[in-house]
Image (tube, rainbow, N blue to C red):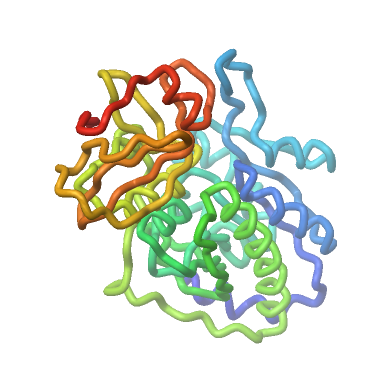
Amino acid sequence: MLLDHLSSFRVLRSSFMNLIFMGTPEFAVPSLQKLIDAGHTITAVFTQPDKPVGRKQIITPPPVKVLAAQHNIPVHQPTKIRTEDARREIEPLFQSVDAGIVAAYGRILPEWMLLAPKFGCINVHSSLLPKYRGAAPINWAIVNGETETGVTIMQMEEGLDTGPILLQGKLAIGDDERTPELTARLSELGANLLIETLTKLEAGEIQPIQQNNKDATYAHILKREDGLIDWALTATQIRNRMRGFTPFPGCHTFLHEQKLEITNCQAEPCASEFEAGTVVEVAKDSFAIACGGQSQLRITEVLPAGKRVMQARDFLNGAKLQVGQRVR
C-alpha cells in the first residue's frame, strides 16, 4: 500500500505540495527551512513538547517550533499520538495533505498516521540504511569507527526504519569529527536530498528500493551508562566513543572515586606491560592510560566532576596523579 503512494506522486500537476512536517531537534531545522524556501505549503508542524533545559531547567521550545513560529506555521505538540483520542483529533489534518515529512521527530508513528496523507509519510534518516536503524545512528557510526555515513530519504512503514529507500547521499566522517559537527553536516545533506526527492517523485524519476533486512544494524538510544569507559578496549575504540558520545553521555572513568570525563585525547601504541586502566605516563601537558591491544590513551583535556572543562596541565596541578595508579 505504501508503494502505491509513491507511484501516485507523478500525477501531481504542481511542484508545490501541501505538507505536514514532523521534527524536533536542530537536525530537522534545515529540512523545514528548505521546504519553506522551495515554496511548499506547510499546513502544520508537529514537534515534541517544550522541555526544561540546562542547570536552571528553563522550559525551552524545540528548535523546529522556533522556526515554525517565525513563519507563522501552526504548531502541534501532542504528548500522545497512539491513542484513539489523538487519532480522532489528528487524522483529519493528515488526510488533508499530500504528504507527511518526518525528520527526527522522536516518536514511532502509528500506521493510520503513515497512511493518512495522500502520498504517505517520508522520513529523513541520518544513516545509510539498512545500517544503523534506530534512534542514534550518527553517534554509533562514529563510535564504531565508520569512515563514511550519509542520509537516507525513505518511505515510512510501520517497522522501525524498514521502509523503501527513495534516495541516499554519502559523506566522509572526519578523523577528529564529533557528533555535533557531523550532525550539522548531515542535516544540510538531508535537507537537500529531501527537496531533490520530492522533485523526482513528482516527475516519476525514483524507483523505490526495498531494504535488505539481512544487512540491517541497530543504533540503540543512548544511555548514561554507555559513557563509562571499558579500558580493555583499544585506545582508538575509546577515542571513537569520546567523539561519538559528545555531548551525551560523554566518555568517563573514575579516579579517586570521582567521575572524570575525557573531553580530548589521542590513541597511541603502548610498549609497557601495565594492565589496562593503569596510568603509564604523567607529562607536563598530558597523561596516558594503558588500554587493550597494546595501546594507550593520551589525555589532554578533562572535565572533573562539578568543575569546568580544563586542560590536562591544569588538572594535573592538583590531581597528584602517579604512574601505576588505576582508574576504573
Location of the C terminus by quadrant is: top left
Residue 194 image point, x, y percent:
66, 66
| Residue displayed at 81% across by 67% down | 16
Residue nearest the viewer, comparing 146 with 61? 146
Snapshot quadrant of residue 141: bottom left
Question: Is residue 107 in view?
Answer: yes
Residue nearest the viewer, comparing 55 with 296? 296
Find the residue positioned furthest to the front: 284
Q: Left or right of 70: which side holds 121?
A: left
Residue nearest the viewer, comparing 55 with 252? 252
Residue 92 image point, x, y percent:
63, 47
| Residue displayed at 60% across by 42% down | 25
Q: Left or right of 222: which side holds 44?
A: right
- Marker count (numbered): 0
Q: Left or right of 142: which side holds 180?
A: right
Snapshot quadrant of residue 193: bottom right
Q: Is residue 181 above or below residue 89?
A: below
Residue 107 image point, x, y percent:
47, 44
Residue 156 image point, x, y percent:
49, 63
Question: Is residue 83 in view?
Answer: no
